Amino acid sequence: MRFKDVFSIIGPPMIGPSSSHTAGAARIGRAARQLFGRLPARAEVLFYGSFAATYEGHGTYSAIVGGLLDMATDDVRLPDSLAIAGQAGMRVGVDAGKGLFVHPNTAELRLFGRGEDEEPAFTLVGTSIGGGNIEIVNVDGFKTSMTGHYPTLVVRNADAPGMIAIVARLLQLHGINIGTMTVDRKSRSGEAMMALETDEDFPPTLREELAAYPEIHRVDFVHLT
């Protein structure tokens, strides 16, 4: 990701101490919350690299949990997020991840629903790349690249001809310009996912319009700014 201006380096309005370790972490957690669509009953957080070494002192753990509670980077409740999560009924565990990581500031989130399933209902890997900027690089096993700088539409669909054209056409009809798009699939003719960052926000009817197509399985939105 390229920084577009000096404000991308300075970082957003935030509760400190660190734009990378606190603001970026909060944004990763908030992206996971918005894609999951609800408050998880349980969350497992794995930190890699620099995150793993300093997540307590830099407030990274509290920031991630605050993001899962849908708190913005400047929410004054961020330092108290662990207590707030407990009051809301969300259990959270943290550990240092093992193996390779895509960036020195990497977090992997595993979210669980209300059941006691051993497998997470949702997974996300995000990196904090400086100045509060992030990149979401994996969602439920799909490779992607989402920054959170723009309104983002995430569509899961059958890997069938014409799906990208359907989504692009609906956005065109609403006068929405696509800035970036990433597409991945788990297997040929299996499930696919596209993530589209746009210049304009989405109308409230878009979810229903997309869901009307049987090949489209799920529609989510990410709004971090």
Image: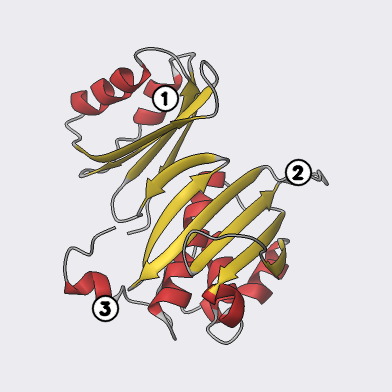
User: Would you place residue 36 above or below residue 92 in this image?
Assistant: above
Say whether disc 3 or disc 2 marks the residue closer to the N-terminus: 3
Residue that mark 3 sits on: 10
Residue that mark 1 sits on: 208
Residue 99: percent from left, percent from top: 64, 60
Say whether disc 1 or disc 2 marks the residue closer to the N-terminus: 2
For the question of whether residue 198 can be seen, the reply is yes
Q: Which mark is residue 119?
A: 2
**At 71% from the left edge and 65% from the top edge, which residue is drawn?**
92
Asked where in the image residue 148 lies, by quadrant, the reply is bottom left
Label 3 to label 2: alpha-carbon separation: 38 Å
In this picture, residue 66 sits left or right of residue 113: left
User: Would you place residue 142 above or below residue 31 in this image?
Assistant: above
**Is mark 1 in CB contact (under 8 Å) with mark 2?**
no
- Give the tally of numbered discs: 3
Q: Nearer the viewer, mark 1 or mark 3?
A: 3
